[in-house]
Image (cartoon, rainbow, N blue to C red):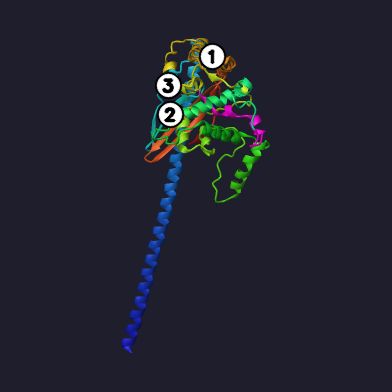
Amino acid sequence: MLRKTCRNKLSYRGAALITALLFVVLSVSISTILYMIMQVELGFADLMISGDRVQNSLKYVETEAIALLNKRNFKNNTENNNKELNQSFISNYSFKSQIIDYVKVSGELEIQSGKFNINYLYDQDFCNKSSNQELDNTNPTSEGKSTKKAIIKEIFTNILMSLDSSNSSSDFEAITPETAEKIINNIQAWMCPYDSTRGENMKGPYIKSKNDKNVQWPYRSSAQKLVVISELKLIKGISNGLYQALKEAVAVWPTSTGIDNVKFDVRFISPFVLAAILGDDVNSAKNKLDTLSENRTVSDKKKAILKIIEEKGIYKDKPEKLQIINGLLGTENKLHYILYSEAIQGRFNITAYTMLSFTNNANVEWRIFGVF
């Protein structure tokens, strides 16, 4: 009887000990899980705080750029009103780099006026014709007459064909005239309104993909002009390698639908644009532009550029074409700049951009903030 009583007591104690151990294990497990959850929440909060600080720092760089442009504009309006704008004032400026939570934030300001604006390719006539209809006036030699629309396409075709595909960071197949034509058609079709013939054709695939959960829907659809240069990556035929090469040669800024508003700013004309007009290589065009640095006024620089074009001799028998190109060279009413701001933390790399369009009174007319 005594042995049985002792055995029962030991059993009760063993059960109590096991129960206590289970409670300890359960408490430790719960505490560990809660600790892990808390660490995740703290880490997430820390990322949010760091992200806000980085964004605020990028905004600071943007504010600094606006102040710099205001200063440059004021300087040119008061001291150098009739002379070529001093772009070196921008190029030689060094943004104040900041280090916040091991994130380095810096910026670089680049002028866009003088580059080829992708939105110049917008063509309402193209949008209103079906894909099996041939367009009038797209061939510069049709009926022996050139058109501004055709020359714009020709310049962009030459830019595409001049891009260096051998660069290791921009690996893509060399562009042929046929490939260039397809790329241009895809860009133009992308910008066609939905109520146009080609716009309706573009609408179908995107509406379908929007309703398909397995398809990643782009942040912007077609049927509108480009807002940022990175949208080119959404357009068929433009590979990542081609995009990397192309973004150095072209730009994007708001423009009206009228082809008459197309201007390549002679103050800052891009070597890619001049090379495309001359049918020359980019390095040769750059060397030619370097020799024009002593021209002090816009009029003098335009005359010097036209002289280079005439001396090339390629428009000797095409005076109407030379006249159209003459009309394409001028000055933009607004100066367009793009601000690249970079934040780097180990493998974490954000490139933000702001498009700044300035009028003579130095007010920001239009801008957009985003991330590549």
Q: Amino acid at mark 2?
A: Gly
In which quadrant of the rendered view does residue 288 lie?
top left
- List the residue tagged with mark 2: 107
- List the residue tagged with mark 3: 91
Mark 2–mark 1 CB contact (< 8 Å): no
Compare residues 369 and 165 and report the one nearer the observer. Answer: 165
The alpha-carbon separation of the residues under discs 2 and 3 comes to: 12 Å
Mark 2 surroundings: few (<14), some (14-19) or many (≥20) residues within 10 A: many
Residue 246 position in % (x across, y down): 48, 31
Residue 43 position in % (x across, y down): 42, 47
Q: Is residue 5 above or below residue 70?
A: below
Q: Nearer the viewer, mark 2 or mark 3?
A: 3
**Left or right: residue 14 compared with residue 212:** left
The alpha-carbon separation of the residues under discs 1 and 3 comes to: 37 Å
Mark nearer the N terminus (2 vs 1): 2
Q: Secondary structure at mark 3?
A: helix
Q: Is residue 196 above or below residue 366?
A: below
Number of marks drawn = 3
Q: Which residues are magenta?
A: 115-133
Compare residues 30 and 302 and report the one nearer the observer. Answer: 302
**Left or right: residue 4 compared with residue 194:** left
Q: Which mark is residue 316?
A: 1
Q: Amino acid at mark 1?
A: Lys
Residue 304 position in % (x across, y down): 49, 11
Q: Secondary structure at mark 2?
A: strand
Determine if the magenta segment contains residue 127. Answer: yes
Determine if the magenta segment contains residue 294. Answer: no
**Left or right: residue 261 compared with residue 244:** right
**Residue drawn at x 33%, y 83% as measured from the top left:** 7
The N terminus, quarter of image:
bottom left
**Residue drawn at x 46%, y 10% as measured from the top left:** 295
Q: Amino acid at mark 3?
A: Ser
